[in-house]
Image (tube, helix red, strand yellow):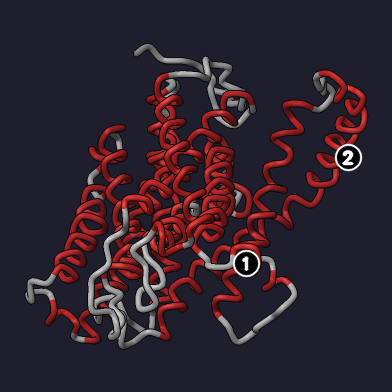
Amino acid sequence: MEHSASPLNRKFWTPGVLVMLVFMMAGAICIIARFTGGLGYVTNLSNARPWGLWVGVDVATGVALAAGGFTTAALAHIAGKHLYEPVTRPALLTAALGYTFVVLGLLVDIGRSWAIWKPIFNWNTNSVLFEVAMCVMVYLHVLYFEFFPIIAEQFKGRVNLPGFLSTFNGLVDKILKVGDAVIGKIMWVFIILGVVLSCMHQSSLGSLMLVAPTKLHPLWYTPILPLLFLTSAVAVGYPMVVFETTLVTASFKLDSEMNILAPLTRITIFLLGIYLFLKLGDMVYRGTYVYLLDGTYQTNSFIVEMLFGILVPWVMLLFERVRASRSGVFIAASLIVFGVVINRINVFIVGYKPPLSENGYFPALTEILVTLGLIATLMFIYRFVVTYLPVLQAPKEVSS
């Protein structure tokens, strides 16, 4: 069956969208409080605990869960597996929104948000954080360039701006046509660049913690932390595509795309198996398994991460019956996504305890509302984009 992306053209203002607006407004109020009252006014952060929820979730987790963009691009365009073309556009949109989420989280988190542009001109080539900042910034623009042809496809030759803006109809249409033609010829450059940049900063996020051997719990501190961050991001790429696609197709009563998702889970067995092998091998080699029975909350969180976030879904996907079941692959994919989320939270929050920090850290309600507000905003934008732009593959509808 031939697949072609098309706008959903569904009713936009639904009860779910209104719920998103509530969280967006709550998050906006807290962000205003953050910029008027300062970080100390809305967070439980301190000089000893300079980062928390916004770094652990908004930045580190956001980057990891956006990995579906470069993994599907590598599979469909570089490896030439065109079967997976129908899921590349949704994955690209998710990646673009995910990295936008990262930048917005950073703007809220860093003390001097107005100086976020300075690494562009003040290079510290000995800093891992500088490499992460530059890679994320460049890759975000690469994602926007990759998304441009989708916008051009929908509006090229049909530009009809309202009111006085109609004067610019011809100019906008020309920009769309020229941009589409130019980007189309060099798209392969952006695809390769996106894969390279992603691999660089995914691993470098792990490198950030290599400077904290006395602050990070031994269960997570390891010299191969950059490799673990990279392999976990690659391993979660396709499960994130499965997770997102299943939610979207179920919500809009579209074709389940199981002919595409099932093969992706077979690839995931291999990728997740590599990550599992590295985690267990590192634990055995360094002897950190001695901490597994000490009963601390860090150890319990590590066990949850390993058991439910890696081992259980990996074993599930070994069975053909699970891979052939829509609910089976969704549950396994959800557990893998959960595993990577809890891993990033463990590394940056749970397992991180500076010697000078006497009190434990738990995010304030306002911190949580900011994060929920940003997530709701991205969901809102995703809903808007797929409604009016050709992103989703919708060859047919299925009965409820």
Q: Is there CB contact under 8 Å for labels 2 and 1?
A: no
Q: Which mark is residue 135?
A: 1
| Label 1, residues with CA under 10 Å away: few <14, some 14-19, many ≥20 | many
Looking at marks 2 and 1 on the same chain, the residue that comes earlier in the sequence is marked by 1
Name the amino acid, label 1. Cys
Numbered circles on residues, count: 2
Q: Nearer the viewer, residue 322 or 381?
A: 381
| In front: label 2 or label 1 | 1
The reply to whether residue 69 is in sight is yes
Residue for point 84% across, 23% down: 157
**Is residue 114 left or right of 16 when viewed as pictured?**
right
Task: Determine the residue positioned at 39% across, 33% down.
Answer: 246
Q: Position of residue 361 (x, y in %)?
A: 27, 67
177 to the left or right of 102: right
In this picture, residue 50 sits left or right of residue 361 = right
User: Dot 1 lies on which element?
Assistant: helix
Q: Residues within 10 Å of mark 2 (few under 14, many from 20)?
A: few
> Which is nearer the eye, 31 or 343?
31
* Quadrant of the image containing the N terminus: top right
In the rendered image, residue 132, in percent from the top left (x then y), is placed at 57, 70
Q: Mark 2 sits on what residue? A: 178
Which residue is most to the top? 399
Task: Report the Cα–Cα distance between label 2 and label 1.
Answer: 27 Å
